[in-house]
Image (cartoon, helix red, strand yellow):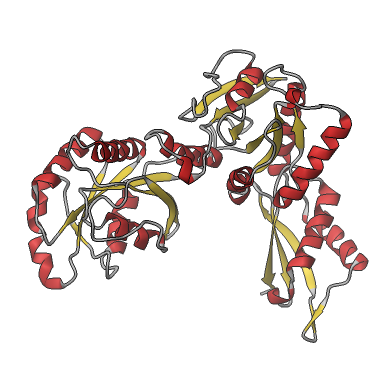
Amino acid sequence: MRKSVVAVVGRPNVGKSTIFNRLVGERISIVEDVPGITRDRIYAQVEWLTTTFNLIDTGGIELSDEPLLVQMREQAEVAMNEADVIIFIVNGRDGITAADEEVAKILYKSNKPVVLAVNKVDNPEMRENIYEFYSLGFGEPYPISGTHSLGLGDLLDAVVQHFPELDQTPDDDDTIYFSLIGRPNVGKSSLVNALLNQERVIVSDIAGTTRDAVDTPFNKDDRDFVIIDTAGMRKRGKIYETTEKYSILRALKAIERSDVVLTLIDAETGIIEQDKKIAGYAHDAGKAVVIVVNKWDTVESNEKAMKEFEEKIRAHFLFLDYAPIVFLSALTRKRTHTLIPKVLEASENHAKRVQTNVLNDVIMDALAMNPTPTIKGQRLKILYATQVSVKPPSFVVFVNDPELLHFSYERFLENRIREAFGFEGTPIKIFARKRG
Protein backbone atom coordinates (compact mmCIF):
# COMPACT_ATOMS: atom_id res chain seq x y z
CA MET A 1 0.00 0.00 0.00
CA ARG A 2 1.71 3.18 -1.15
CA LYS A 3 1.37 6.15 1.16
CA SER A 4 1.03 9.70 -0.08
CA VAL A 5 4.06 11.98 0.32
CA VAL A 6 3.87 15.56 1.60
CA ALA A 7 6.82 17.96 1.43
CA VAL A 8 7.17 20.99 3.72
CA VAL A 9 8.96 23.82 1.88
CA GLY A 10 9.62 27.53 2.27
CA ARG A 11 12.40 30.04 2.66
CA PRO A 12 14.73 29.69 5.66
CA ASN A 13 13.54 30.43 9.18
CA VAL A 14 9.79 30.40 8.63
CA GLY A 15 9.27 27.54 11.10
CA LYS A 16 9.23 24.51 8.79
CA SER A 17 10.98 22.20 11.26
CA THR A 18 8.74 23.31 14.12
CA ILE A 19 5.67 22.49 12.03
CA PHE A 20 7.24 19.17 10.98
CA ASN A 21 7.85 18.18 14.61
CA ARG A 22 4.31 19.16 15.62
CA LEU A 23 2.74 17.13 12.83
CA VAL A 24 4.93 14.09 13.50
CA GLY A 25 4.39 14.33 17.23
CA GLU A 26 8.03 14.21 18.30
CA ARG A 27 11.13 16.38 18.07
CA ILE A 28 12.94 14.95 15.04
CA SER A 29 14.07 18.05 13.16
CA ILE A 30 16.48 20.44 14.87
CA VAL A 31 14.76 23.71 15.68
CA GLU A 32 16.76 26.91 16.18
CA ASP A 33 16.08 30.52 15.30
CA VAL A 34 18.92 30.45 12.79
CA PRO A 35 18.40 30.18 9.00
CA GLY A 36 19.68 27.01 7.36
CA ILE A 37 19.71 24.65 10.37
CA THR A 38 17.87 21.93 8.42
CA ARG A 39 20.16 20.98 5.55
CA ASP A 40 19.04 17.46 4.71
CA ARG A 41 15.57 16.24 3.97
CA ILE A 42 14.12 14.51 7.04
CA TYR A 43 11.10 12.24 6.75
CA ALA A 44 8.65 10.55 9.07
CA GLN A 45 5.18 9.03 9.02
CA VAL A 46 2.20 11.11 10.11
CA GLU A 47 -1.26 9.83 11.03
CA TRP A 48 -4.23 12.13 10.66
CA LEU A 49 -7.66 10.64 11.42
CA THR A 50 -7.74 7.50 9.26
CA THR A 51 -4.93 8.51 6.90
CA THR A 52 -1.21 7.80 7.16
CA PHE A 53 1.29 9.61 4.95
CA ASN A 54 5.02 10.34 4.68
CA LEU A 55 6.09 13.86 5.60
CA ILE A 56 9.37 15.41 4.43
CA ASP A 57 11.08 18.35 6.08
CA THR A 58 13.45 20.28 3.81
CA GLY A 59 16.15 22.89 4.06
CA GLY A 60 15.04 26.42 3.31
CA ILE A 61 14.94 27.41 -0.36
CA GLU A 62 17.24 30.36 -0.88
CA LEU A 63 18.41 31.66 -4.24
CA SER A 64 22.17 31.98 -3.83
CA ASP A 65 25.35 30.76 -5.49
CA GLU A 66 26.79 29.72 -2.14
CA PRO A 67 27.45 25.94 -2.41
CA LEU A 68 25.58 24.92 0.75
CA LEU A 69 22.52 26.96 -0.16
CA VAL A 70 22.55 25.56 -3.69
CA GLN A 71 22.57 22.01 -2.27
CA MET A 72 19.72 22.83 0.11
CA ARG A 73 17.66 24.20 -2.78
CA GLU A 74 18.40 21.11 -4.87
CA GLN A 75 17.29 18.81 -2.05
CA ALA A 76 14.07 20.75 -1.61
CA GLU A 77 13.38 20.49 -5.34
CA VAL A 78 13.98 16.73 -5.26
CA ALA A 79 11.54 16.46 -2.35
CA MET A 80 8.94 18.49 -4.24
CA ASN A 81 9.30 16.25 -7.29
CA GLU A 82 8.60 13.18 -5.15
CA ALA A 83 5.69 14.74 -3.21
CA ASP A 84 2.00 14.35 -3.94
CA VAL A 85 1.16 17.53 -2.02
CA ILE A 86 3.34 20.48 -0.94
CA ILE A 87 2.86 22.57 2.20
CA PHE A 88 4.27 26.04 1.53
CA ILE A 89 5.18 27.74 4.82
CA VAL A 90 5.44 31.54 5.08
CA ASN A 91 6.00 33.81 8.09
CA GLY A 92 2.89 35.76 9.08
CA ARG A 93 4.93 38.30 11.02
CA ASP A 94 7.09 39.25 8.06
CA GLY A 95 4.41 39.49 5.40
CA ILE A 96 5.26 38.52 1.82
CA THR A 97 8.96 38.79 1.09
CA ALA A 98 10.87 38.64 -2.18
CA ALA A 99 12.17 35.21 -1.12
CA ASP A 100 8.58 33.96 -0.67
CA GLU A 101 7.76 35.10 -4.19
CA GLU A 102 10.80 33.28 -5.58
CA VAL A 103 9.75 30.07 -3.80
CA ALA A 104 6.26 30.52 -5.22
CA LYS A 105 7.69 30.67 -8.75
CA ILE A 106 9.42 27.32 -8.17
CA LEU A 107 6.16 25.84 -6.86
CA TYR A 108 4.22 27.04 -9.91
CA LYS A 109 6.54 24.96 -12.09
CA SER A 110 6.06 21.83 -9.96
CA ASN A 111 2.41 21.44 -11.06
CA LYS A 112 1.70 19.89 -7.65
CA PRO A 113 -1.15 20.77 -5.27
CA VAL A 114 0.11 23.43 -2.86
CA VAL A 115 -1.44 24.25 0.53
CA LEU A 116 -0.31 27.65 1.84
CA ALA A 117 0.30 27.82 5.60
CA VAL A 118 0.94 31.17 7.30
CA ASN A 119 2.99 30.36 10.40
CA LYS A 120 3.55 32.38 13.59
CA VAL A 121 -0.06 33.56 13.71
CA ASP A 122 -0.12 33.24 17.48
CA ASN A 123 -3.26 35.23 18.33
CA PRO A 124 -6.62 36.05 16.70
CA GLU A 125 -5.67 39.67 16.02
CA MET A 126 -2.91 38.54 13.64
CA ARG A 127 -5.40 36.67 11.44
CA GLU A 128 -6.42 39.95 9.84
CA ASN A 129 -2.92 40.26 8.38
CA ILE A 130 -2.97 36.99 6.41
CA TYR A 131 -5.15 38.14 3.53
CA GLU A 132 -2.23 39.63 1.64
CA PHE A 133 -0.95 36.07 1.14
CA TYR A 134 -3.79 35.40 -1.32
CA SER A 135 -1.64 37.29 -3.82
CA LEU A 136 0.83 34.37 -3.89
CA GLY A 137 -1.74 32.52 -5.98
CA PHE A 138 -2.30 29.35 -3.96
CA GLY A 139 -5.82 29.96 -2.77
CA GLU A 140 -6.84 30.18 0.87
CA PRO A 141 -3.96 30.74 3.31
CA TYR A 142 -4.25 28.70 6.51
CA PRO A 143 -3.19 30.56 9.67
CA ILE A 144 -1.20 28.33 12.01
CA SER A 145 1.17 28.53 14.94
CA GLY A 146 3.79 25.82 15.16
CA THR A 147 4.86 27.04 18.59
CA HIS A 148 1.35 26.79 20.05
CA SER A 149 -0.04 24.01 17.76
CA LEU A 150 -2.84 26.23 16.49
CA GLY A 151 -4.64 25.60 13.20
CA LEU A 152 -2.81 22.37 12.37
CA GLY A 153 -6.02 20.33 12.15
CA ASP A 154 -7.49 22.62 9.49
CA LEU A 155 -4.17 22.51 7.64
CA LEU A 156 -4.10 18.70 7.62
CA ASP A 157 -7.73 18.52 6.50
CA ALA A 158 -6.79 20.65 3.50
CA VAL A 159 -3.69 18.59 2.74
CA VAL A 160 -5.51 15.24 2.86
CA GLN A 161 -8.16 16.49 0.42
CA HIS A 162 -5.46 16.76 -2.25
CA PHE A 163 -4.21 13.18 -1.87
CA PRO A 164 -4.47 11.15 -5.08
CA GLU A 165 -6.58 8.02 -5.23
CA LEU A 166 -3.94 5.38 -4.62
CA ASP A 167 -4.33 1.79 -5.71
CA GLN A 168 -4.40 -0.24 -2.54
CA THR A 169 -3.99 -3.51 -4.45
CA PRO A 170 -2.01 -4.39 -7.57
CA ASP A 171 -3.81 -4.48 -10.93
CA ASP A 172 -3.57 -8.25 -10.93
CA ASP A 173 -4.15 -9.88 -7.55
CA ASP A 174 -2.09 -12.90 -8.64
CA THR A 175 0.99 -10.78 -9.31
CA ILE A 176 3.63 -11.03 -6.58
CA TYR A 177 5.50 -7.80 -5.88
CA PHE A 178 8.86 -8.16 -4.19
CA SER A 179 11.62 -5.66 -3.48
CA LEU A 180 15.32 -5.94 -2.71
CA ILE A 181 16.74 -3.94 0.17
CA GLY A 182 20.19 -3.76 1.68
CA ARG A 183 23.17 -1.53 2.17
CA PRO A 184 25.04 -0.22 -0.89
CA ASN A 185 27.09 -2.60 -3.02
CA VAL A 186 25.57 -5.73 -1.51
CA GLY A 187 24.63 -6.94 -5.01
CA LYS A 188 20.99 -5.98 -5.40
CA SER A 189 21.25 -4.88 -9.01
CA SER A 190 23.32 -7.94 -9.91
CA LEU A 191 20.64 -10.15 -8.40
CA VAL A 192 17.93 -8.38 -10.40
CA ASN A 193 19.87 -9.05 -13.60
CA ALA A 194 20.47 -12.67 -12.61
CA LEU A 195 16.78 -13.29 -11.96
CA LEU A 196 15.77 -11.60 -15.21
CA ASN A 197 18.65 -13.10 -17.16
CA GLN A 198 19.38 -9.70 -18.70
CA GLU A 199 21.17 -6.44 -17.95
CA ARG A 200 18.08 -4.64 -16.68
CA VAL A 201 19.82 -2.32 -14.19
CA ILE A 202 23.28 -0.76 -14.01
CA VAL A 203 25.82 -2.85 -12.12
CA SER A 204 28.91 -1.20 -10.70
CA ASP A 205 31.41 -1.69 -7.88
CA ILE A 206 30.78 1.94 -6.92
CA ALA A 207 28.43 2.02 -3.96
CA GLY A 208 25.23 3.94 -4.65
CA THR A 209 24.92 3.37 -8.40
CA THR A 210 21.18 2.71 -8.07
CA ARG A 211 19.46 5.88 -6.85
CA ASP A 212 15.80 5.11 -7.50
CA ALA A 213 13.37 2.22 -7.26
CA VAL A 214 13.02 0.37 -10.56
CA ASP A 215 10.02 -1.89 -11.32
CA THR A 216 10.37 -4.81 -13.70
CA PRO A 217 7.57 -7.30 -14.40
CA PHE A 218 8.49 -10.85 -15.41
CA ASN A 219 6.97 -14.32 -15.59
CA LYS A 220 8.45 -17.42 -14.01
CA ASP A 221 6.84 -20.87 -14.18
CA ASP A 222 3.53 -19.31 -15.26
CA ARG A 223 3.51 -16.90 -12.31
CA ASP A 224 3.63 -13.12 -12.70
CA PHE A 225 6.09 -11.17 -10.59
CA VAL A 226 7.20 -7.55 -10.32
CA ILE A 227 10.68 -7.06 -8.93
CA ILE A 228 11.53 -3.68 -7.38
CA ASP A 229 15.20 -2.77 -7.15
CA THR A 230 16.04 -0.04 -4.64
CA ALA A 231 18.95 2.18 -3.78
CA GLY A 232 21.27 0.98 -1.03
CA MET A 233 20.57 2.29 2.45
CA ARG A 234 23.50 3.99 4.17
CA LYS A 235 23.72 5.09 7.77
CA ARG A 236 22.41 8.65 8.09
CA GLY A 237 25.90 9.99 8.84
CA LYS A 238 27.28 8.44 5.66
CA ILE A 239 24.78 9.97 3.27
CA TYR A 240 26.42 12.61 1.14
CA GLU A 241 25.01 13.09 -2.34
CA THR A 242 21.83 15.08 -2.82
CA THR A 243 20.00 12.35 -4.69
CA GLU A 244 21.26 9.57 -2.43
CA LYS A 245 19.99 11.30 0.68
CA TYR A 246 16.47 10.58 -0.55
CA SER A 247 17.04 6.89 -1.27
CA ILE A 248 15.80 5.57 2.07
CA LEU A 249 12.36 7.10 1.63
CA ARG A 250 12.17 5.63 -1.87
CA ALA A 251 13.17 2.23 -0.48
CA LEU A 252 10.51 2.51 2.22
CA LYS A 253 7.94 3.31 -0.46
CA ALA A 254 9.10 0.21 -2.34
CA ILE A 255 8.65 -1.88 0.82
CA GLU A 256 5.10 -0.57 1.22
CA ARG A 257 4.25 -1.76 -2.30
CA SER A 258 5.77 -5.19 -1.82
CA ASP A 259 4.28 -8.51 -0.83
CA VAL A 260 7.73 -9.94 -0.10
CA VAL A 261 10.95 -8.15 0.80
CA LEU A 262 14.35 -9.68 0.09
CA THR A 263 16.89 -8.54 2.68
CA LEU A 264 20.36 -8.92 1.20
CA ILE A 265 23.48 -9.64 3.24
CA ASP A 266 27.02 -9.58 1.85
CA ALA A 267 28.68 -12.92 2.61
CA GLU A 268 32.09 -11.39 2.01
CA THR A 269 31.83 -8.55 4.55
CA GLY A 270 29.53 -10.41 6.92
CA ILE A 271 26.73 -9.08 9.11
CA ILE A 272 26.90 -5.51 10.39
CA GLU A 273 24.53 -3.47 12.54
CA GLN A 274 23.13 -1.63 9.52
CA ASP A 275 21.88 -4.94 8.09
CA LYS A 276 19.65 -5.42 11.13
CA LYS A 277 18.31 -1.88 10.93
CA ILE A 278 17.45 -2.28 7.25
CA ALA A 279 15.73 -5.62 7.84
CA GLY A 280 13.75 -3.98 10.62
CA TYR A 281 12.06 -1.69 8.08
CA ALA A 282 10.49 -4.71 6.36
CA HIS A 283 9.56 -6.41 9.64
CA ASP A 284 7.95 -3.26 11.03
CA ALA A 285 5.93 -2.90 7.82
CA GLY A 286 4.51 -6.40 8.35
CA LYS A 287 5.88 -7.73 5.07
CA ALA A 288 6.94 -11.26 4.22
CA VAL A 289 10.72 -11.52 4.34
CA VAL A 290 13.36 -13.73 2.74
CA ILE A 291 16.96 -13.29 3.88
CA VAL A 292 19.37 -13.58 0.95
CA VAL A 293 23.09 -14.15 1.54
CA ASN A 294 24.74 -12.92 -1.66
CA LYS A 295 28.33 -13.33 -2.91
CA TRP A 296 28.41 -16.84 -1.47
CA ASP A 297 31.00 -17.71 -4.13
CA THR A 298 33.57 -15.45 -2.42
CA VAL A 299 33.71 -17.49 0.79
CA GLU A 300 34.27 -21.12 1.69
CA SER A 301 30.87 -22.23 0.46
CA ASN A 302 30.47 -25.71 1.89
CA GLU A 303 27.64 -27.12 3.98
CA LYS A 304 29.46 -26.54 7.28
CA ALA A 305 30.18 -22.89 6.45
CA MET A 306 26.58 -22.43 5.36
CA LYS A 307 25.28 -23.83 8.64
CA GLU A 308 27.63 -21.64 10.68
CA PHE A 309 26.61 -18.51 8.75
CA GLU A 310 22.94 -19.38 9.21
CA GLU A 311 23.48 -19.68 12.97
CA LYS A 312 25.04 -16.20 12.99
CA ILE A 313 22.04 -14.80 11.13
CA ARG A 314 19.60 -16.39 13.56
CA ALA A 315 21.57 -14.99 16.50
CA HIS A 316 21.64 -11.45 15.05
CA PHE A 317 18.15 -11.39 13.53
CA LEU A 318 16.04 -12.77 16.37
CA PHE A 319 13.03 -10.77 15.17
CA LEU A 320 13.22 -12.54 11.77
CA ASP A 321 13.18 -16.11 13.04
CA TYR A 322 10.33 -16.82 10.62
CA ALA A 323 12.30 -15.74 7.51
CA PRO A 324 13.88 -18.43 5.29
CA ILE A 325 17.54 -18.00 4.35
CA VAL A 326 18.84 -18.45 0.80
CA PHE A 327 22.54 -18.61 -0.07
CA LEU A 328 23.47 -17.68 -3.62
CA SER A 329 25.81 -15.80 -5.92
CA ALA A 330 24.21 -13.24 -8.21
CA LEU A 331 27.47 -12.86 -10.13
CA THR A 332 27.93 -16.54 -11.00
CA ARG A 333 24.16 -17.21 -10.75
CA LYS A 334 24.88 -20.21 -8.57
CA ARG A 335 21.85 -21.25 -6.47
CA THR A 336 19.75 -18.35 -7.80
CA HIS A 337 17.14 -20.93 -8.84
CA THR A 338 16.40 -21.55 -5.14
CA LEU A 339 15.19 -17.99 -4.54
CA ILE A 340 11.90 -17.68 -6.46
CA PRO A 341 10.33 -20.77 -4.80
CA LYS A 342 11.01 -19.17 -1.41
CA VAL A 343 9.51 -15.87 -2.59
CA LEU A 344 6.43 -17.70 -3.80
CA GLU A 345 6.06 -19.64 -0.54
CA ALA A 346 6.49 -16.51 1.59
CA SER A 347 3.91 -14.64 -0.50
CA GLU A 348 1.37 -17.43 -0.20
CA ASN A 349 1.88 -17.67 3.56
CA HIS A 350 1.59 -13.89 3.86
CA ALA A 351 -1.92 -14.12 2.37
CA LYS A 352 -2.92 -17.41 4.05
CA ARG A 353 -6.21 -17.78 5.90
CA VAL A 354 -7.08 -20.57 8.32
CA GLN A 355 -10.53 -21.75 9.29
CA THR A 356 -11.76 -20.63 12.69
CA ASN A 357 -12.69 -24.12 13.90
CA VAL A 358 -9.29 -25.53 12.94
CA LEU A 359 -7.53 -22.56 14.55
CA ASN A 360 -9.42 -23.11 17.81
CA ASP A 361 -8.55 -26.80 17.79
CA VAL A 362 -4.88 -25.79 17.68
CA ILE A 363 -5.39 -23.24 20.49
CA MET A 364 -7.16 -25.79 22.70
CA ASP A 365 -4.37 -28.33 22.11
CA ALA A 366 -1.84 -25.66 23.04
CA LEU A 367 -3.74 -24.93 26.27
CA ALA A 368 -3.74 -28.62 27.15
CA MET A 369 0.00 -28.82 26.48
CA ASN A 370 0.86 -25.65 28.41
CA PRO A 371 -1.93 -24.26 30.66
CA THR A 372 -2.26 -20.51 30.92
CA PRO A 373 -0.29 -18.82 33.71
CA THR A 374 -1.67 -17.23 36.88
CA ILE A 375 -0.74 -13.58 37.39
CA LYS A 376 -1.46 -11.89 40.73
CA GLY A 377 -3.96 -14.58 41.62
CA GLN A 378 -5.81 -14.41 38.30
CA ARG A 379 -5.60 -17.05 35.61
CA LEU A 380 -5.78 -16.15 31.94
CA LYS A 381 -8.77 -17.73 30.22
CA ILE A 382 -8.67 -18.06 26.43
CA LEU A 383 -12.22 -18.37 25.16
CA TYR A 384 -11.71 -18.59 21.40
CA ALA A 385 -9.67 -17.15 18.53
CA THR A 386 -10.27 -16.05 14.96
CA GLN A 387 -8.20 -14.72 12.07
CA VAL A 388 -9.20 -11.15 11.22
CA SER A 389 -6.89 -10.22 8.33
CA VAL A 390 -4.00 -11.22 6.07
CA LYS A 391 -0.80 -9.56 4.85
CA PRO A 392 0.33 -10.19 7.54
CA PRO A 393 -1.91 -12.90 9.03
CA SER A 394 -3.48 -11.38 12.13
CA PHE A 395 -5.42 -13.17 14.87
CA VAL A 396 -7.65 -11.96 17.67
CA VAL A 397 -7.71 -14.06 20.84
CA PHE A 398 -10.70 -13.38 23.07
CA VAL A 399 -9.80 -13.64 26.74
CA ASN A 400 -11.17 -12.78 30.19
CA ASP A 401 -8.53 -10.04 30.69
CA PRO A 402 -6.10 -8.91 27.95
CA GLU A 403 -3.55 -7.77 30.55
CA LEU A 404 -3.10 -11.37 31.66
CA LEU A 405 -1.74 -12.42 28.25
CA HIS A 406 1.98 -12.16 28.93
CA PHE A 407 4.40 -11.73 26.03
CA SER A 408 5.97 -15.13 26.71
CA TYR A 409 2.63 -16.94 26.46
CA GLU A 410 1.70 -14.95 23.35
CA ARG A 411 4.98 -16.15 21.86
CA PHE A 412 4.07 -19.73 22.80
CA LEU A 413 0.75 -19.41 20.98
CA GLU A 414 2.47 -17.96 17.94
CA ASN A 415 4.87 -20.91 17.82
CA ARG A 416 1.99 -23.39 18.04
CA ILE A 417 0.15 -21.60 15.21
CA ARG A 418 3.30 -21.67 13.08
CA GLU A 419 3.82 -25.38 13.75
CA ALA A 420 0.25 -26.13 12.73
CA PHE A 421 -0.10 -23.91 9.66
CA GLY A 422 3.40 -23.10 8.47
CA PHE A 423 3.57 -19.34 7.88
CA GLU A 424 7.26 -19.52 6.96
CA GLY A 425 8.46 -16.20 5.63
CA THR A 426 5.73 -14.00 7.14
CA PRO A 427 5.25 -12.32 10.48
CA ILE A 428 1.99 -13.02 12.26
CA LYS A 429 0.22 -10.77 14.75
CA ILE A 430 -1.82 -11.75 17.79
CA PHE A 431 -4.17 -9.31 19.53
CA ALA A 432 -5.89 -9.97 22.85
CA ARG A 433 -9.45 -8.71 23.24
CA LYS A 434 -11.91 -8.98 26.08
CA ARG A 435 -15.05 -10.77 24.98
CA GLY A 436 -18.02 -8.45 24.75
Please state if 268 lies on the left or on the right of 112 as rendered.
right
> What residue is shown at x 81% (from left), y 26% (from top)?
301
Where residue 143 sits in the image (x, y, percent)? 19, 62
Please state if 213 lies on the left or on the right of 149 as rendered.
right
Q: In front here: 89 or 268?
A: 268
Of all residues, the one furthest to the top in this rendering is 198
Where residue 284 sits in the image (x, y, percent)? 60, 51
Occupied quadrant, residue 176 = top right
Query: Can residue 205 be seen from the camera position used here?
Result: yes
Q: Is residue 335 depicted above or below 141 in this figure?
A: above
Occupied quadrant, residue 335 = top right
Q: In front here: 224 or 406?
A: 406
Of all residues, the one furthest to the bottom in this rendering is 377
Q: Is residue 105 depicted above or below 94 in this figure?
A: above
Of all residues, the one furthest to the right in this rendering is 369
Q: In front here: 86 or 327?
A: 327
> What residue is shown at x 70% (from left), y 26% (from top)?
295
Occupied quadrant, residue 84 = top left
Query: Quarter holding the C terminus?
Result: bottom right
Where residue 282 sits in the image (x, y, percent)? 60, 45
Where residue 241 sits in the image (x, y, percent)? 39, 34
Q: In front here: 222 or 79?
A: 79
Please state if 378 lies on the left or on the right of 225 as rendered.
right
> What residue is shown at x 29% (from left), y 46% (from top)?
59
Q: Is residue 113 depicted above or below 16 in this figure?
A: above
Count of residue discs: 0
Query: Can residue 351 be seen from the camera position used here?
Result: no
